[in-house]
Amino acid sequence: MRKTLVLLFSISFFTAFAQNAPVKPKLIVGIVVDQMRYDYLYRYQSKLGPGGFNRLLREGFSCENTHYNYVPTYTAPGHAAIYAGAVPAVSGIIANDWYDPEWGKHRYVTTDTTVLSVPRSVKKSVGQHSPRVLLSTTITDELRLSNNFQSKVIGVCLKDRASILPAGHIPNGAYWFDDASGTFITSSYYQPKDTSLPKWVQDFNDRRLPESYMKQSWTKLLTTPYTESFENWDRYDDATYSKSIKSGFPHDFSTIKKSEGYGVLRFTPFGNTLTLEFAQAAIDNNEMGMDEVPDFLCLSFSSSDYCAHQFGVHGEETEDLFLRLDQDISHFLEYLDKKFGKNNVLVFLTADHGGAETPAHLRDLQIPAGVFDESKLEEKLEQAIGFALGVNGDYIIEVANQQIYLNWNAVADLDQDPNEIAQVIIDFMRHQAGVYDAYTREAVMMLPTDYPFASEIRLGIHPRRSGDLIYQLDPAWHADDQLFKSGGTTHGSSYAYDTHVPLLWYGWKVKPGENFDRVNITDIAPTLAAILRIMEPNGSTGKVITDILKK
Ligand SMILES: [Zn+2]
């Protein structure tokens, strides 16, 4: 009798324990829309369908006041901050490219010459990428570490860096787009032994979707006027990100393709559609979300960024791209519903940065704005230093991302005081149009905490990777002078147009609602860790957003 009671107690205890064990979503999908300002949710809302962004707003939880909390606001640091919960000061992802003192030269963020393209037929530089530059773990790493690698993690994006950084150091795969062949590829980092792509990737590539997209032309989705975009905008969309795609519908690919190949798809809504088709193939062929162990798909849409860089935030092309992305997201949510059921999938959608008003347009409206010639700054500074010290020399290695790297060897050889050189640079910068101020790294660390953007600048500085001096521009001023003179747009600053992004949660246990509390982009990863009851990424500096789940 007693034994039976003990047995019954044990069974009920373990049943109760099993019931209390955290139930987790079967699939998590992180959607990052490259260069999506939060206001697009509302600017285009009357033209969006019910099943895409509007469904996420209606059925999901919106953190309406989500911001980047560091500079520079670029793609690579943005994706790292979302998935690692870490600012550049910790993650080491200080920009898309920068001067690397260890390499002694300029580097692209994910470039890794110790790995090879898969397949080998792809040009070396396109495939030689890995996440090794990322100094902290990602939420996707922590998920894999939490359960002996049972969770599957895959990164998907046209851009290498936006596929690689979210998927972390130990994913099952990360894939990006090769413009020359019009195919998705990877690197030997992810599959050291196998020199050919997984069969499902080959099968997808064999469908030749890019060719079918390029047989059509890009026309407007809607026949109603695009009243959310400015008329006569064509004089402001002459950016040179793409040399051959010009403004004005329809865009005929048959003439464009000759000069740019499949890369032109990046500037169009079809680049997003292609990415989504590939993401669904990744889910289907890897049996993601099919058991109780949570899997994680990192899905980033890049075409919104290329398109807005080219056509600006008020171009009809940008509006049309978002209307079509809305349709893609609607189809994707339907697919997730059908395959898994809404309550088994957790989706979040955010952006890696916002985007600015076109300075030439603002100036025509008599709003202060401008482009700062960063590409010419090094030469001007060398002259100013040479003049001030009476000795010409190679005092500066590089200027990039609003940071100035001193040539310490030359400074030592010429027996010059680095503080004196720094002061010459600061004095020069303070006399330049559009410059708010310039600082040495040490001076930035000494600024009062409530000094404008002191925190954002500090959190963007990595001790071993950042420049020796930093400069801040006025609102609506931009340092991207080579590609961005009179048209299109860019991003990278500490101002709201670049930092304020959407953050929508949807699906598994998410309650409908919104809040207007300040949320930092670094809060996403620790929130996911709390939901999944796993460790937050090891460089996480964010806090858990507490009110998105049902009690
Ligand atoms: Zn971006």
Image (spheres, grey):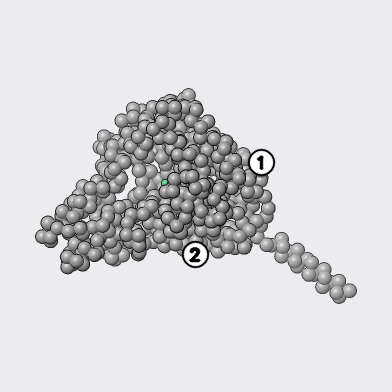
According to the picture, the residue beneath numbered tag 2 turns out to be 538
- Corner quadrant of residue 440: bottom left
Q: Amino acid at mark 2?
A: Asn
Residue 102 appears in the rendering: yes
Q: Position of residue 491 (x, y in %)?
A: 36, 46
Residue 351 appears in the rendering: no
Height in image: 283 above or below 441?
Answer: above
Q: Position of residue 106 (x, y in %)?
A: 33, 54
Q: Disc 2, ligand 1: is the CB inside 8 Å? A: no
Q: Nearer the viewer, residue 487 or 386?
A: 386
Question: In the structure shown, which secondary structural element does the residue marked by tag 2 occupy?
Answer: loop
Residue at mark 2 to residue at mark 1: CA–CA distance: 36 Å
Residue at 68% in and 53% down: 291
Image quadrant for the C terminus? Answer: bottom right
According to the picture, the residue beneath numbered tag 1 turns out to be 338
Q: Nearer the viewer, residue 143 or 405?
A: 405
Q: Nearer the viewer, residue 417 or 243?
A: 243
Q: Position of residue 72 (x, y in %)?
A: 36, 53
Q: Position of residue 51 (x, y in %)?
A: 57, 37
| Residue at far bottom of view | 2
